[in-house]
Structure formats: C-alpha cells, structure tokens
C-alpha cells in the first residue's frame, strides 16, 4: 500500500495563524475603541449647542445668563439663582451637562460636558467646554482637538 498525502493543516500552521490574528486584534481593537469614543463626542457637542440656544433665548428675557439647568426657565435676582430650561444629560447619555461654576454673568457663560458611563474613558476630552463671552462671541471650544 502506498501512503497517500493527507489534506489539512498542521498544528504549527494553525498556531501561526492564531498568533497573527491575535497580533492584528491587539492593534485594531484599541484603534476601533478610539474611533467609537470620538464618534460619541458628537453627543456632547449636540447637547452643548442645545444649551447655547436655550441660553440665548433665556438671555432675551433676563438681564443675565442662567447658572443652572432645569425643567423650566426661571429668571432669578442673579445668574446663580437663575435656571435655563435644558437637559443635564446628553440625549445618548454619554455626557453630564452643566454651566461652569460661577461662569454665568450678564455677558458670559461656559457650558461643560463631562463624559460619563462608556464615554468616561475619553480622558483626552474630559471635560469638553464651550465658552461664550464678549471676546469669544462665536464660542471658544476646549480642548480644541475634541471639537
């Protein structure tokens, strides 16, 4: 009887293939995660811009911008006692929104988007800010690379 050639893979070939796949995964997965984090930033951006619109509408009827976010517009005696109608959480839930501490005045305010939940790993953009004042009427975005 003649010994025939058997079809298939040797154990060494399978181990080499698995090693190559493992290396590719180690390189590709972190890049994928970074891409997902960057995409989720749009959730914080949209929420910040919605608060900006709400603040501008609020300012039309009140002598200063509001310091707090809430369910109704309330023009108090000071910015610290005023509330603008806006959500404190972004629509997808990746950011907690707020007005920067003591940043709201008659002509300035800073919107702060703090990453939370799955987005908390985005330490490069923690927090994202959007500042409006006389020197920056179109808004100063920080960190700039995050916008």
Image (cartoon, rainbow, N blue to C red):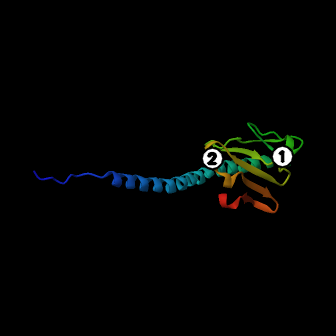
Please name the residue shown 82% across and 54% down the image: 108
Q: Which mark is residue 32?
A: none
Q: Quadrant of the C terminus?
A: bottom right
Dot 2 alpha-carbon crowd within 10 angstroms: few under 14, some 14 to 19, many 20 or more: some
Please name the residue shown 82% across and 60% down the image: 134
Please name the residue shown 85% across and 45% down the image: 79
Number of on-image labels: 2
x, y percentage for residue 36? 56, 51
Q: Is residue 89 left or right of residue 81?
A: left
- Asked if residue 39 shows in the view, the reply is yes
N-terminal-most mark, 1 or 2: 1
24 vs 136, nearest the viewer: 24
Please name the residue shown 83% across and 41% down the image: 82
x, y percentage for residue 130? 73, 55
- Asked whether disc 1 touches disc 2, contact meaning CB atoms under 8 Å apart, the reply is no
- Asked if residue 147 shows in the view, the reply is no
Image quarter of residue 34: bottom right
Q: Which mark is residue 62?
A: 1
Residue positioned most to the right = 77
Alpha carbon of mark 1 to alpha carbon of mark 2: how far? 35 Å
Residue that numbered label 2 is attached to: 119
Q: Label 2's element? A: helix
Q: Label 1's element? A: loop
Residue positioned most to the top = 71
143 vs 59, nearest the viewer: 143
């Amino acid at each position: 009887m003649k010994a025939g050639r058997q079809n298939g893979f040797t154990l060494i070939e399978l181990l080499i293939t698995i090693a190559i796949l493992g290396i590719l995964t180690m390189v590709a997965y972190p890049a994928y995660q970074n891409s997902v984090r960057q995409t989720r930033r749009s959730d914080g951006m949209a929420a910040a811009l919605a608060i900006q619109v709400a603040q501008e509408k609020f300012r039309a009827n009140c002598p200063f911008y509001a310091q707090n976010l809430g369910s109704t517009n309330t023009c108090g005696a000071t910015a610290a006692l005023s509330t603008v109608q806006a959500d404190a959480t972004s629509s997808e839930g990746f950011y907690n929104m707020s007005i920067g501490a003591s940043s709201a005045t008659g002509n300035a305010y800073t919107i702060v988007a703090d990453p939370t939940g799955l987005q908390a790993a985005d330490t490069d953009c923690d927090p994202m800010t959007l500042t409006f004042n006389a020197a920056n009427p179109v808004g100063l975005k920080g960190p700039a690379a995050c916008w």
